[in-house]
Amino acid sequence: MHYKKLSFIIISIFAMSAFAEDYIDSRIDDLLTKMTLEEKIGQMTQYNGFWDATGPMPSEGENKNKLDQLKRGLVGSVLNVSGTKQVKEFQDIAVKQTRLGIPLIFGLDVIHGQKTIFPIPLGETSSWDLEVMERSARDAAIEASAMGINWTFAPMMDVSIDPRWGRVMEGAGEDPYLGAKVAVARIQGFQGKDLSRSDTIAACAKHFAGYGFVTAGRDYNTVDIGTYTLYNTVLPPFKASVAVGVKTVMNAFNTLNGTPSTASAFLQRDILKGQWGFQGVVVSDWASGREMIEHGTAKNLKEVAEQSLKAGSDMDMESYAYNRNLAELVTEKKVDESLINDSVRRILKLKFELGLFDNPYKYINEKREKSALYNKKHIDDSLDAARKSIVLLKNSNGILPLSKKIKNVAVIGSLANDKNSPLGSWRMASDDNTAVSLIEGMSRYTNEFKYEQGVRLVDGKESFFAPLVFNQTDRSGFDAAKKLAKSADVVVMMLGEHGFQTGEGRSQANLGFPGLQQELLEEIYSVNPNIVLLVSSGRPLVLDWADKHLSTIVQTWQLGSQSGHAIAQVLFGDYNPSGKLPMSFPRSVGQLPMTYRHFATGRPGPNVDVFWSHYTDESNDPLYPFGYGLSYTTFEYSKLIINKTANNKISVSAEITNTGTREGEEVVQLYLHDKFASFIRPVKELKGFKKIQLKVGQSLNVKFELSDEELGFYNPEGKFLVEPGEFDVMVGTSSVSGISGSFSI
Ligand code: GLC
């Protein structure tokens, strides 16, 4: 195409998008002039769905108040309402019964799927496959938008180095570089390339910021980190998200440097909206504003409202602070209406960009709702994401893959027959018991196996809200399981966590198998050590006994709707496992928090005396390190070549060869160590990865280019530094194994 024509087209596209921006801004200006102060504050209010369980319209109490406010145009957004019927009921009131007819925006936690459920985010990150993670988010957005949702409170991107914190299951693990790439992929999946389409939804970078560093891994606990950790470990995924155009950010329950995040102007105005120029909407976490009273920085909701608004929190989720206090604060000249106008402008702009003003009912299409949910492509994508998320931790006797002709297999464990736990805990719109269980997945390959539960995992209610009660006494299934195992050639045991054992409010001080599972494992081992252990969990568990005694261990996470089929494909070799751990697995809880990205300390040791940084009763090293995962084949790394490029970058290349007996995928990882700098630098940091597929005997030269972005770091004031000096570089199959070299800049 002639370059003039091409340049005309490019200029036109930019001109059109600039025009569209101006057009939206002018419509917002016009609307703002018409809105009363009360109506503006209403846009800054988000309520949980408030239809009474008994019928559509609440007749009294708080829900009645919310309904009255909705009818008066004093509600901007609703969460936890989905399904075209109910969404329409709410939208009808907002659009047809209020003075200005401003449409609502409907939010929901679409964390890893709407109806078709994908692997939990931590599990899916083990695939290290950004295209897969973007595709999963795209599929989820198609299903959620078909149910009337236009905003998801995802991706969660809290870097965490402590699996005692139950919310690690929602994120992308311990590394900010990987976390940033994964966050961007998921945001692009949710938001697509055109937010005005009816199958794209606004994403939300959460929780801003530092929630993953709760002290002792205890949820909602104090976060006490320095700005050096904040800038270099916590913020990179958020910065990348803003750069890629995430439309919303959610602040956090935790305090940072003595201030609750919702009231932190440092985080929200200085960094997010100031330095990074974020133009979207900041929404509070659920009643995180109100919680400032518990934190002790606000005496009442009026102070909450003043502090939150001044700090840059645009929308109040379920604190009832803004709706009840902001108008008075303006009258008393304690807050300036310009701050309210800025927040309302951001909220209205999001609604315009979503196309809700042009057509408030664009996400309400019953026909699409029926065809989009559980559609075959989503199911197939869920299966593919699931099998790529599985991590082979050990296979020292080569039991796996099992022959498809195998006979006499014992399958033991309540999770092997559980159709609910594979869905994880953050699955607000899913249907219970819709996952393919391991038993069902194996049946697609063979019926030559027998199943025994061995031990019941939980007793009583299994729900997102209620604590689980683990069976600690009933061993009545042990004998039958032992009898079955004794006569089996191979025992497949699926042990681990219940689906509601991780997620929000699910921190644990112990990370072994819950209930009587460990006892059962040891009993089974005593009659037949030929065990394939499948670990189904939402977080790294402590697997030290299993590692000492068993030859075959597979981390299966919670893999979503197609769990059983994915695991069976790996067990029987139809898929060669390629997953790599996004989070270190500790040897014991006492080692936590732990990360491969640790600093040397002044006494890295080891020393002959005791005066170095170590435990007298435990190793410093993880049981299974970050980036680790085996394959049914083997890969060899060679020919590391380091060069300076013409554009003053550093190119690092290595040759990877499939030296085994079958085709496989490998995640080639690049780690850097900045040996001397003006501030301490981690002993190693992930700064590149590529997932490749190699046939038997095939070699591939994998090349990375390192620029300032990879070589630099932030000082405690947030200034990005690239300092001359020596770097060690390792290209390898995990954070602990590869070929090394060095270079200087
Ligand atoms: C919860 C979570 C947050 C979620 C919000 C809405 O408490 O902290 O991640 O998006 O409330 O459900």
Image (tube, rainbow, N blue to C red):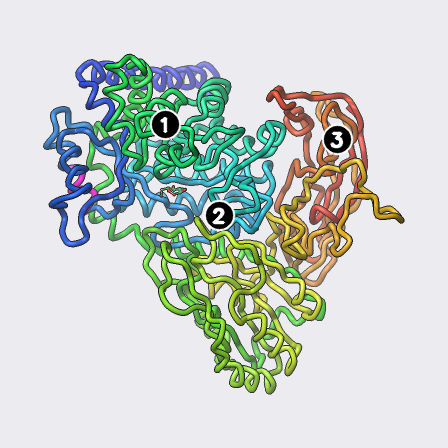
Circle 2 residue? 167
Which element type, helix, strand or loop, lies under badge 1? Answer: strand
Q: Is residue 102 above or below residue 696?
A: above
The prevailing secondary structure element of the residues shown in magenta is: helix
Please tell me which residue lies in front, 104 or 566: 104
User: Residue 89 magenta-drawn?
Assistant: yes
Q: Give percent across and percent down for residue 92.
A: 14, 37
Q: Is residue 558 left or right of residue 543?
A: left
Marks 2 and 3: CB-CB under 8 Å? no
Marks 1 and 3: CB-CB under 8 Å? no
Circle 3 residue? 674
Query: As shown in the figure, which amino acid type bears the numbered disc 3?
Result: Asp
Asked if the beta carbon under badge 2 is closer than 8 A to the nearest atom of ligand 1, the reply is yes
Residue stretch in magenta: 85-91
Q: Is residue 315 left or right of residue 37?
A: right
Q: Is residue 695 left or right of residue 428?
A: right
Q: Which callout, 2 or 3, points to the residue nearer the camera?
A: 2
Circle 1 residue? 281
Query: As shown in the figure, which amino acid type bears the numbered disc 1?
Result: Val
Q: Give percent across and percent down for residue 431.
A: 32, 59
How far is mark 1 from mark 2, CA to CA? 23 Å
Q: Is residue 414 above or below residue 182?
A: below
Mark linked to residue 428:
none
Q: Residue at x 49, y 26 (%)?
A: 243
Which element type, helix, strand or loop, lies under badge 3? Answer: strand
Question: Which of the four quarters of the rendered structure image does ligand 1 lie in?
Answer: top left
